[in-house]
Amino acid sequence: MLIIDARDAESLDRALKNYKKKFEKAGIMKQIRNRQSFTKPSIEKRTTVLKAVYREKMKRDED
C-alpha cells in the first residue's frame, strides 16, 4: 500500500503527482500485468537471453 505524506501547504495536484511517481517506481502495474497470465520459466529465460543478444548486436552495430 502506498502512503503519501500530504503537507498542509501542498496542493492536491502536487500530492497526486507524488503518488503517481511512487506508484510507477513500485512497479505495481508491471506486477499486475505479469500475474494475468503464467509464463513458463524456460520461456522467461529464453526471452531474457534473446533481449541480451539483441542489445549486444545493437551495441556492436553502433560502434
Image (spheres, helix red, strand yellow):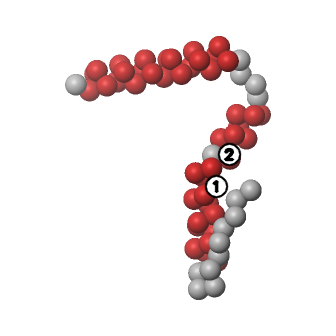
Quarter-of-image position of residue 22:
bottom right
Residue 4, which numbered label?
none
Report helix, strand or loop for mark 1: helix
30 lies above or below 48: below
Report helix, strand or loop for mark 2: helix
Task: Locate the N terminus and report the quarter of the image it occupies.
Answer: bottom right
30 lies above or below 40: below
Task: Tell me the crowding category of disc 2: few under 14, some 14 to 19, or many 20 or more residues within 10 angstroms, Cα based.
Answer: few
Residue 28 position within the rendered picture, expressed as x and y whole percent measured from the top left: 68, 47
Residue that label 2 marks: 29
The mark that comes first in sequence, 1 or 2, is 1
Quarter-of-image position of residue 43:
top right
Horizontal arrangement in the rendering, residue 37 relative to residue 42 (left or right): right
At label 1, the amino acid type is: Phe
Residue 31 position within the rendered picture, expressed as x and y whole percent measured from the top left: 69, 40
Residue found 70% across the figure and 64% down from its top: 3
Tag count: 2
Residue found 56% across the figure and 19% down from its top: 47
Residue 41 position within the rendered picture, expressed as x and y whole percent measured from the top left: 67, 18
Horizontal arrangement in the rendering, residue 58 relative to residue 22 (left or right): left
At label 2, the amino acid type is: Met
Marks 1 and 2 in Cβ contact (< 8 Å)? yes
Residue farthest along the bottom direction in this orientation: 9
Residue that label 1 marks: 23
Task: Tell me the crowding category of disc 1: few under 14, some 14 to 19, or many 20 or more residues within 10 angstroms, Cα based.
Answer: some
How far is disc 1 from disc 2 in space, using C-alphas?
Answer: 8 Å
Quarter-of-image position of residue 61:
top left
- 5 vs 21, nearest the viewer: 5
Residue 38 position within the rendered picture, expressed as x and y whole percent measured from the top left: 76, 25
Task: Locate the C terminus and report the quarter of the image it occupies.
Answer: top left
32 lies above or below 22: above
